[in-house]
Amino acid sequence: MPPIYYHEGKFPPEKLDWERLIPLIGPANAAVARYDGILSVIPNATVLLSPLTTQEAVLSSRIEGTQATMGEVLEYEAEGESDKLSYERQADINEILNYRKALRVAENLLKKLPLCQRVVKEAHRVLMTGVRGQGKSPGEYRKISNWIGPPGCSMEEARFVPLSADKLPVAMSVWEKYLHANAPDRLVQLAIIHAEFEALHPFLDGNGRLGRMLIPLFMNQSGMITSPMFYISAYLEAHRDEYYERLMRVSSEGAWAEWCIFFLKAVHCQANDNQQKARDILTLYEQMKTKFVDLTHSQYAILALDWIFERPIFKSTDFVQSAGIPQPTAFRILNILKRNDILRELRPGKGRTAAILMFGELLNIAEGYNAF
């Protein structure tokens, strides 16, 4: 089959089949609003929902072919290195950690800038620094053609050929203008923004992950959610073939409405899932607040709880050194939490090697099943 070529001159779409979209728009927006209701009442959501942010980074990267799990990522981060993991798996993990860093950098930039090409380029620079693909011009639009298909294929053998590099600067300016345009519905606008970014494929590598990262950033900036914490990749990973097929058909058939229908369903499903997980995490936090205080009888109980929520797999020495708790008290709190099965040892301490501890109940909520 000949490759599909980018839909030049057909963005943004002149017409959409609103009759087919309207029945999905209301429920999707309502689900996002319910999720934001939970998000807005979570104290320090960045801390409490950090496992969900890590899970999003894992799943968005998995769509691109990485294999690392959330547990491996957090354990690797706690240890600082690992001789148990292959080079490939460590490379996977570093890409996932970069995803989280890039999202944080973009989030901070949006405190003083609108969502724009500068933010996109800076997020890409962080995403690609020091990992596979770092030689592919981090933070710069590609200067050469690229195409999507089997490894090593020629352009003629490709599945999809994005816009030529010389036309990218103008096309990205049109894309940026549409980011800030008034639209009948923000979620439909976001669906079109995401599809266009993926079709343009402006960078030599990292386009898929960056395009998905733009989803919570746009939702936050347009006022749909109070923090840029929306986790959509579980649905996209579970429906990966349809995800790619719908994006391709935008260029091959002008099937914008079909793509928007798929996207609205993804948002609706994940808004409900995000809401349930956020509520479960908030419930767990409130239960643990009481439990930590009752068990430790310490003025540092909540400080310890917040620290562990942000790092549900950690090295015991890191807690002692950086939680801001006097050392004897920190050791005492860890021992109490282990005795009461709140923390479990992933790896016991031995000699000068610190124990790796895990707060499994929180991780299981993020995973959606009893993985730990």
Image (cartoon, rainbow, N blue to C red):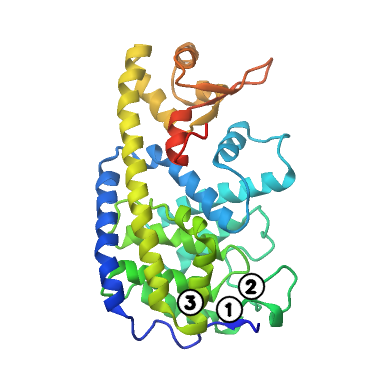
On screen, residue 97 above or below 297 = below
Q: Are marks 1 and 2 in contact (CB under 8 Å)?
A: yes
Q: Are marks 2 and 3 in contact (CB under 8 Å)?
A: no
Q: Amino acid at mark 1?
A: Pro
Closer to us: 310 or 22: 22
- Give the left or right position of residue 69, taking residue 47 as reference: right
On screen, residue 38 above or below 304 = below
Residue 212 in sight in this render: yes
Percent coordinates x, y for residue 363 in the rendering: 47, 35
Helix, strand or loop under label 2: loop
Report the Cα–Cα distance between label 2 and label 3: 19 Å
Closer to us: 218 or 69: 69
Percent coordinates x, y for residue 209 in the rendering: 53, 59
Residue wearing tag 3: 172
Query: Which of the 4 quarters of the picture holds residue 113?
Result: bottom left
Q: Which mark is residue 162?
A: 1
Name the N-terminal-most of marks 1 and 3.
1
* x 44%, y 69%: residue: 194
Name the N-terminal-most of marks 1 and 2.
2
On screen, residue 240 above or below 184 = above
Q: Which mark is residue 328?
A: none
Q: Amino acid at mark 3?
A: Met
Residue wearing tag 2: 148
Q: Amino acid at mark 2?
A: Ile
Percent coordinates x, y for residue 372 in the rendering: 52, 31
* x 71%, y 39%: residue: 85
Helix, strand or loop under label 1: loop
